[in-house]
């Protein structure tokens, strides 16, 4: 996610901004830039690459500026280029932005900007609209208010006006932005990590409220110009814990980031309520004529692929296969130029997955990758890339990457169904609306289930083994749940198709053995319950995960966890959060390193 820093006051603004951006590097980015007031105009220094390289470039600046804004960009709209880097300077206006302007195409048309644009970013469009109103109204505040009244989407803006030296105008909607006034001037930032050297007291800008920063302080006002009192907050974090946003572990931070990550990943690919892959230029005619889909990945990414298969295959009625990447390479796979190969990888660097991509390409497949890291090897070697916008995933155990991968694949599947006449526009709209609501389902679990899950974790850490069972989609969820638990709690956890238990595994069930039975799929709910009764009657401690309101006899479970009562196709999002929290609490209760489990790396770049 992008990083923002603003400063105005007696200190050297260039130094404050560059140091602040360095502290925000953990947010992930691919380019960086600053804008500085020097006398009567504004100078912009920006480029792709690391903050250190930007620092080297700025080392030649001789004038000391006392006001400026800085930005690290995690590319969403528009590729990783110098021109697309922020800040964007348009006439007398200079802007940095974190978020996604959903209606920037409409604004481009309304203000006839196409021929004027020098970048392919939604941010430049917003800057040009502010400049348009600044020329018309000759008032910075009025220009900002008028502009944001026309924006749809998410934003955190810091704006400089050449005629108003020393002043920074800030406003946000959904995207994070904080501000602080200190004896050393006034600051703005995406999060407090960037400011800890100067202050531990700050306030979060209320949404759609303007903050005016000047050396004398930081002043909030509403659209009517009424002063708004800031709600002051204080942190006692050190920089390291601040990078975790105050969470004890990156994994818990990233679990909590999922609702936002889902929105950030989906919104740029939804136009008028329907899936839209214009930006990625994936040709509809190939989506329409491909004869099979091969999904290739490792670990959690592969399990995301299994969930996608369960949706796409019955919808499209074409073969959809899921392959372990490390096996694909040696399986002489049935791939040809009618094959759509979906390559899923959070890091974009997993060597087994890269090998599989290269083999598939040699065999004529069209490669569409779903990747979280911009410019990674898998992304660069794909024919088309669907970037997920989850922000950096630091914990080895993948969480937000998994759910945004599923969401991205679901959206692609919906587009394929539309172009193949398998889904009407009306049904597609409903599907997309349901998919966007998955954020709410995830948030509900985070808020309502956490304590109960922590209690369950305290129980299961007494055992060396645990089993996850499910049918249909629930089986796919159980595979990911078992992986999460085993990789960070070191409990031997296995997942089984529930119907398979009687064919051997049930011999392993002893008194108290934890069995997580996932029962969110209505067509097979009764069968799953009977499997749960079977293991419980042999002594298992059954944790039953169902939709709210689903009835289950007491002989089927010891503890019941419920998720929102949603369409079967979307239960994976809240279920995933339950299973992530179960693994997290198990590891944490055992006093283990949740973020860096033994023997594991975040990206497996060796065969
Ligand atoms: C998941 O929690 C693991 N860290 C691991 O299975 C991971 O999903 C796998 O190594 C694939 O990584 P990738 O998505 O970066 O390719």
Image (cartoon, rainbow, N blue to C red):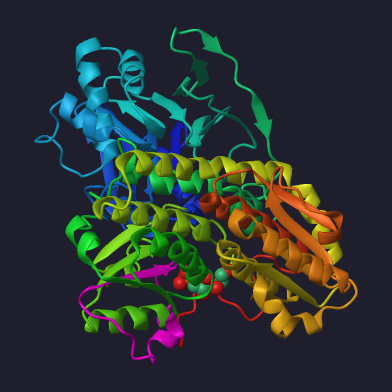
Depth check, front residue: 584 or 60: 584
Asked if residue 562 can be seen in this view, the reply is: yes
Depth check, front residue: 454 or 49: 454
Q: Is residue 96 left or right of residue 518?
A: left
Q: Is residue 462 left or right of residue 52?
A: right
Q: Which residues are magenta?
A: 324-351
Depth check, front residue: 167 or 352: 352
Residue found at x 24% / y 76%: 365
Residue found at x 23% / y 28%: 107
Q: Is residue 480 left or right of residue 542?
A: left
Q: How many marks?
A: 0
Residue 452 lies, in percent from the top left, at 80, 50
Residue 216 lies, in percent from the top left, at 50, 20
Residue 421 lies, in percent from the top left, at 26, 51
Asked if residue 57 can be seen in this view, the reply is: no
Tell me if residue 316 comes above or below residue 265 in the rendering.
below
- Does 283 appear in magenta? no
Residue found at x 21% / y 79%: 364
- Does 340 appear in magenta? yes
| Quadrant assignment, res 366 | bottom left
């Amino acid at each position: 996610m992008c990083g923002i820093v603003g400063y105005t006051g007696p200190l050297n603004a260039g130094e404050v901004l560059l140091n602040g951006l360095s502290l925000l590097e953990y947010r992930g980015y691919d380019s960086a830039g600053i804008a500085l007031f020097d006398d009567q105009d504004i100078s912009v220094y920006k480029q792709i690459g690391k903050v250190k390289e930007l620092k080297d470039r700025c080392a030649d600046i001789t004038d000391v500026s006392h006001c400026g804004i800085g930005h690290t960009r995690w590319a969403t709209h528009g590729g990783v280029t110098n021109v697309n880097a922020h800040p964007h300077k348009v006439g007398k206006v200079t802007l940095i932005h974190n978020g996604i302007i959903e209606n920037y195409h409409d604004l481009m048309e309304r203000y006839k900007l196409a021929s004027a644009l020098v970048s392919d970013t939604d941010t430049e469009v917003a800057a040009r609209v502010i400049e348009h109103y600044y020329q018309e109204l000759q008032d910075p505040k009025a220009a900002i208010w008028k502009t944001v009244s026309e924006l749809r989407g998410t934003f955190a803006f810091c704006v400089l006006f050449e005629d108003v030296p020393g002043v920074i105008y800030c406003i946000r909607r959904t995207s994070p932005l904080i501000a602080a006034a200190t004896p050393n001037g006034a600051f703005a930032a995406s999060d407090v990590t960037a400011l800890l050297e100067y202050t531990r007291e700050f306030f979060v800008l209320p949404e759609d409220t303007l903050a005016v920063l000047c050396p004398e302080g930081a002043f909030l006002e509403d659209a009517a110009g009424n002063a708004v009192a800031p709600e002051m907050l204080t942190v006692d974090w050190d920089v390291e814990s601040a990078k975790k946003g105050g969470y004890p572990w990156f994994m818990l931070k990233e679990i909590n980031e999922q609702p936002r990550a889902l929105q950030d990943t989906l919104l740029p690919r939804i136009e008028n309520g329907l899936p839209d892959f214009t930006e990625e230029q994936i040709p509809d005619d190939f989506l329409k004529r491909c004869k099979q889909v091969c999904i290739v990945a490792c670990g959690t990414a592969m399990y995301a692929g299994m969930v996608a298969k369960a949706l796409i295959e019955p919808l499209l009625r074409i073969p959809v296969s899921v392959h372990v990447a490390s096996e694909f390479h040696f399986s002489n796979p049935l791939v040809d130029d009618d094959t759509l190969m979906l390559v899923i990888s959070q890091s974009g660097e997993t060597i087994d997955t890269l090998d599989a991509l290269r083999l598939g390409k040699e065999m004529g497949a069209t490669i569409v990758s779903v990747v979280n890291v911009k410019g990674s090897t898998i992304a660069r070697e794909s024919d088309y890339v669907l970037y997920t916008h989850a922000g950096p995933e630091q914990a080895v155990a993948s969480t937000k990457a998994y759910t945004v991968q599923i969401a991205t694949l679901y959206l692609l599947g919906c587009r394929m169904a539309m172009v193949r006449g398998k889904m009407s526009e009306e049904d597609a709209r409903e599907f997309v609306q349901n998919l966007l609501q998955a954020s709410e389902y995830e948030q509900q679990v985070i808020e309502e289930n956490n304590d109960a899950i922590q209690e369950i974790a305290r129980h299961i850490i007494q055992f060396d083994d645990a089993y996850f069972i499910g049918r249909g989609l629930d089986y796919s969820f159980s595979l990911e749940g078992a992986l999460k638990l085993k990789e960070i709690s070191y409990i031997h956890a296995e997942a089984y198709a529930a119907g398979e238990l009687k064919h051997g595994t049930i011999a392993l069930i002893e008194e108290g053995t934890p069995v997580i039975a996932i029962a969110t799929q209505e067509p097979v709910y009764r069968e799953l319950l009977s499997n749960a009764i079977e293991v419980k009657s042999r002594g298992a401690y059954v944790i039953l995960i169902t939709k709210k309101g689903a009835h289950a006899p007491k002989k089927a479970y010891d503890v019941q966890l419920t998720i929102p009562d949603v369409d079967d196709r979307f239960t994976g999002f809240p279920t995933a959060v339950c299973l992530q929290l179960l693994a997290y609490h198990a590891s944490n209760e055992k006093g283990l390193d949740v973020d860096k489990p033994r023997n594991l790396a975040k990206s497996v770049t060796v065969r």
